[in-house]
Each structure stands twice: as C-alpha cells, then as structure tokens.
Image (cartoon, grey):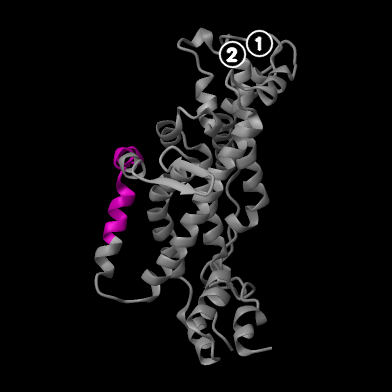
C-alpha cells in the first residue's frame, strides 16, 4: 500500500477527531449535569409545540387527500375525515390534469431538471471552491465578492436577462432542433446560475477546514495535484458535497417560476410544480382540493426519500485536523 493510500484510507481519523476537536477522555467539567425537572418539562412542552406546528399542516393536507367527500372547499381544520378513500391518489397518478401528460411524465421532467442542475452546480462548485480555498491569485478577493454579490440577488431578478440570453440560442443536432430557452436544458442552466454561487461559497467554507498537511503528505508521497484533489480532498469533502447536492436537487425539484416562465407553453415539458399550480382554479371553489392535496403529498415524497437515503452523508460530521503519521 502506497503512502498516498495511507493518507486516504489507511487510517480512520474519526475516533481521534470529532467536529474539529481531539476526542479524548471526558473531563470532569465537561460532564453535563441533569436539568431540573421543571426545566425538562418546560423544554419538552416547547418541543411538542414546535413539532405540532410543523406537522399539523402536513397531517391536514394528508387528511384532505384521503377524504372520500372529494371536497372542492376545505370545511375546517379537521384531521380525521368521516371516511377514507384513495381515489384522489388514483386520479392523480392516472391523469393529474386535463393536459395530455401523465404524472410519471411530469415527475421525469422534474427529475431531469433537479438531477442535471444539482450535478452541474456541484461539479463546477467543488472545483471553483478548491481553487479559492487553496490557490492565491490576482483578483481572488474581487471574484469572491462578485460571487457573493450574485448570491445576494433574488432569483426573480435574473429571470429576464436569462430569458433573453437563452432565447438567442437555437440547438440543431441531427434530427433535434429546439430553442434553448424553451427546453428543460435551458431551465436547468437557468437554475444552475442561482445555485452555483451558493455551492461555491458553501463548499469553500468546508474545504478551508480540511488540513493542508494531508495534501502536503500526499505530495511528498509523489501524488500529483489531480490525485490529491480526487483521492484526498474529495473523499473528505463528501458530507459538504452531499449537502450541496441535496439542496441543489431540492431547488431544482421544487422550482416553479423559472420553469413556468420558460416553458409554460410546452405541455410535454411541464414539471410537477407547474402541473400542481395549474390545478388551482380561478376561484378557490373551482379547485379539487382532495386531488390537489394528494398531488402535493406525492410531490414531496421523492425528496423525502432522497433525504432519508443519504441522511448519514447529510448529517455526518467530518474528522478534521489529522495528519499522516
């Protein structure tokens, strides 16, 4: 096993470092004392109240979705419907709107936008963040401030210039011929423009915590700069990459205004968010609330599944401060 492998996977640094501090025997003054009973009860009541505030809207939406009455107007904040049925879910999965596109077609379009935008944002974000974190070049501070300025802009402020810019490109490749603006690719690029500044700053802050000693040890063992980046830095930055990728996926999955403005006339390119909004009638009484609620629940399920599958990467800490020994 080479020295580079020793740096990358030869030693597990986690037992020695947790959240940037050396993990040793607990000192006496670090031992936590039990809270008084009254304070424990007060904290528990506060947490129960917060949980109820967060969960009540979700439970209420689910209650409406399984209500057999097929309400066109919610009749109150009732969590227990008089009778239960899954007809609303069946209708949504079969034909969610009057337009000729299925639920699975909508979901696939949303998946393409979410996956492509998050992948591009993480790919370019990690390379740019590594350059800002490790390299010192002229104009570095000005570029970082410029990226921060773009990050501070509201997303809606960039829709018009992006619309005009992407509308000027017409893609022709073999039998394919489409306007870049009126396509899922153009929507993904527009979303990346708002996700990339956040990805750069978020990943740079994390890369700054990775000790340079590990990279220097790899260089001493003969590793090239690319090997150091791919075999040492990237594995250590997995938690930050997972968080950035998940937030990018979430943003692409739920994006509405950009998608609607760019491709609202092309029904076959509609996403779940656009179709969900189209279910809302001109007046509240014209909205099939049971189907709307079922659609909303199904809309949220994939993101929840992604979170639970990659939960250990999203909430996992990174052991920092270790050097080759």
Residue 318, given in percent of the width and then of the height, sits at 56, 67
Q: Which residue is labeled 2 in the image?
A: 288
Q: Which residue is labeled 1 in the image?
A: 70
Residue 25, given in percent of the width and then of the height, sits at 62, 74
Residue 177 is labelled as none
- Helix, strand or loop at label 2? It is loop
**Majority SS type along the magenta span:** helix
Q: Earlier in the sequence, mark 1 or mark 2?
A: 1
Provide the residue span drawn in magenta. Answer: 145-161
Residue 146, given in percent of the width and then of the height, sits at 27, 58
**Circle 2 Cα neighbour tier, 10 Å, few/some/many (<14 / 14–19 / ≥20):** some
Please report the residue visible at 52 percent of the width from the left and 55 percent of the height from the top: 119
Specify the farthest residue to the front: 174
Residue 243 sits above or below residue 88 on the image: below
Between residues 176 and 155, which one lies in front from this camera angle?
Answer: 176
Residue 9 occupies quadrant: bottom right
Tell me, yes or no, whether the highlighted magenta stretch contains residue 31. Answer: no
Residue 167 occupies quadrant: top left
| Quadrant of the image containing the C terminus | bottom right
| Quadrant of the image containing the N terminus | bottom right
Position of 221 with respect to 127 (left or right) is right
Position of 262 with respect to 148 (left or right) is right
Residue 125, given in percent of the width and then of the height, sits at 44, 61
């Amino acid at each position: 096993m080479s020295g580079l492998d020793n740096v990358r996977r030869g030693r597990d640094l986690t037992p020695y470092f947790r959240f940037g501090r050396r993990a040793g025997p607990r000192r006496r003054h670090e031992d936590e004392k039990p809270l008084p009973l009254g304070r424990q009860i007060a904290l528990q009541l506060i947490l129960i109240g917060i949980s109820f505030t967060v969960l009540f809207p979700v439970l209420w939406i689910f209650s409406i979705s399984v209500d057999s009455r097929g309400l066109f107007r919610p009749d109150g904040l009732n969590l227990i419907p008089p009778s239960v049925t899954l007809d609303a879910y069946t209708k949504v999965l079969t034909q969610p709107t009057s337009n000729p596109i299925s639920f699975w077609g909508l979901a696939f379009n949303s998946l393409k936008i979410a996956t492509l935008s998050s992948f591009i944002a993480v790919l370019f974000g990690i390379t740019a963040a590594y350059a800002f974190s490790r390299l010192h070049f002229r104009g570095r501070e000005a570029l970082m401030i410029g990226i921060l300025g773009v990050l501070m802009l509201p997303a809606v402020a960039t829709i018009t210039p992006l619309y005009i810019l992407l509308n000027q490109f017409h893609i022709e490749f073999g039998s394919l011929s489409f306007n870049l603006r009126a396509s899922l690719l153009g929507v993904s690029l527009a979303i990346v423009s708002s996700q990339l500044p956040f990805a750069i700053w978020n990943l740079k802050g994390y890369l700054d915590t990775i000790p340079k000693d590990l990279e220097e040890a790899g260089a001493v063992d003969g590793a090239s700069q690319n090997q150091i980046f791919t075999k040492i830095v990237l594995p250590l930055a997995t938690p930050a990459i997972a968080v950035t990728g998940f937030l990018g996926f979430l943003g692409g999955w739920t994006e509405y205004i950009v998608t609607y403005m760019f491709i609202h006339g092309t029904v076959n390119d509609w996403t779940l968010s656009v179709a969900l909004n189209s279910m809302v009638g001109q007046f509240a009484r014209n909205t099939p609330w049971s189907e709307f609620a079922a659609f909303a629940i199904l809309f949220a399920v994939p993101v929840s599944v992604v979170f639970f599958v990659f939960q250990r990467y999203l909430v996992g800490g990174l052991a920092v401060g270790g050097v080759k020994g």
